[in-house]
Image: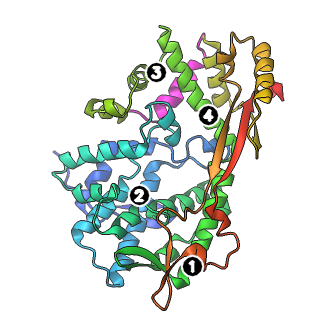
Amino acid sequence: MSKPNKLKIFNDPIYGFIRIPNTLIFDLIAHPYFQRLRRISQMGLSYLVYPGAHHTRFHHALGSMYLMQKSIQVLRFKDVEISNDEENGLLGAILLHDIGHGPFSHAMEHSIVEGISHEYISLQFMNELNKMFNGSLTVAISIFTGNHPRTFLNQLVSSQLDMDRLDYLKRDSFYTGVAEGNTNAERLITMLNVVDDKLVVEEKGIYSVEKFLMARRFMYWQVYLHKTGVVAEQLLIKILKRARHVLDQGVDLNASSALIYFLKTRIDQDKFNNETLAVFAKLDNVDILSAIKEWQESKDFVLSELCKMIVNRRLLHIKVKKEPISNEKMRLKMEKIKEQLGLKDFDETSYFVFTGKIENKAYDRDKQNINILKKNGKIVDVAKLSDHLNLNALSNTVTKYYICYPKEAV
């Protein structure tokens, strides 16, 4: 006999007690699609750099929902009308905004599926859940896709100052121990308001916005784009690429049925149907980690070596430069490693020697600006109003280039 739903609370290390507001949200959290997020890491392989970074997408989704509850409370206090349907839409949209992430988060967007973003997969999950919940997520889907007629509702879920960013900066800062990323999310929320149906920040909150943007810049360079984390993620992508190659050669590999399905089947957006979604819902970090441990014993030298690098944290050396890596430097490294490791050709060598680039842009002035509401009622972009000299600089994209290769070739 099934038990009736009870409104429960979660004890969160960041915000304390998080209350589940109603049975719809309770049922969404209890659904296997959402429970899967307990097994999806929030920060991929960043724990190889920051040992505490083992928190999950489940943590983050609940934290984002908590901040959304606070935002709704603040805006209603300021006489912004938000109906019960709109409230449920906001809570549903922010709760499910990351439900489409694959194992180890962003790495899978380049490996398991081809050219399909996690946002697209999140939408497929939400559409499926909407059928199961008799259309209860219709408003949530319109907000998630940015199509709701009330612009500020869309902005609370996806903008440059949304509940997603406010939570992950604070949460990732906490779990990594990188204090520079810590922002006062609740203080920022108390400064929110709505003018002409668009989200604004009251003038007294400008310094909180500046700190938020600086924290975002620091977290990208120190955490999300940390060079060791970059090389670990690239190795994971290379492992799955090589596993595909080995399977294409007719060699069997031990792995879960869900992982084998995606390695053997080329899935693009046209082929991502309900059957594919059901298999994707079975995929999590456990599938990848158990496969990597197993593949260390593979007879394929490339696959075996790459897996040992991840398991034993014996990663490739990485150098980060301001200018692109020259073709001559790449050729010399490739020749040296091909000879040292006894590899057959440059195709095999490319798994161990490769280049790439990383980009950081803390504030995009051309896309959904953060607008400040001045005391005289005028609305001004934060970068124009700020007396912080670095804020205009944060609007520029900073690009760095890297080259990875085995330590033997240093």
Q: Which residues are magenta?
A: 283-299
Location of mark 2 (residue):
62
- Mark nearer the N terminus (3 vs 4): 4
Instruction: Name the mark nearer the viewer: 3 or 4.
Output: 4
**Residues at marks 3 and 4, CA–CA distance in whole angstroms:** 20 Å
Can you name the residue that lies furthest to the right here?
410
**Residues at marks 1 and 2, CA–CA distance in whole angstroms:** 27 Å
- Mark nearer the N terminus (4 vs 2): 2
- Magenta segment's dominant SS is helix
| Label 4 secondary element | helix
x and y percentages locating residue 1 in the rendered image: 16, 45
**Residues at marks 3 and 2, CA–CA distance in whole angstroms:** 31 Å
Identify the residue at horizontal 27%, vertical 30% (top origin).
Answer: 275
x and y percentages locating residue 216 in the rendered image: 60, 61
Contact between labelled residues 1 and 4, with CB atoms less than 8 Å apart = no
Residue type at mark 4 is Gln
Q: Quadrant of residue 101?
A: top left
Location of mark 4 (residue):
234
Task: State whether residue 91 is above or below residue 340.
Answer: below
**Residues at marks 4 and 2, CA–CA distance in whole angstroms:** 29 Å
**Residues at marks 1 and 3, CA–CA distance in whole angstroms:** 51 Å
Q: Quadrant of residue 78?
A: bottom left
- Mark nearer the N terminus (1 vs 3): 1
- Mark nearer the N terminus (1 vs 2): 2
Q: Quadrant of the C terminus?
A: top right
x and y percentages locating residue 282 in the rendered image: 36, 33
Residue 7, magenta (yes or no): no
Instruction: Name the mark nearer the viewer: 4 or 2.
Output: 4
| Label 3 secondary element | loop
Identify the residue at horizontal 50%, vertical 68% (top origin).
Answer: 369
Q: Which mark is residue 148?
A: none
Location of mark 1 (residue):
206
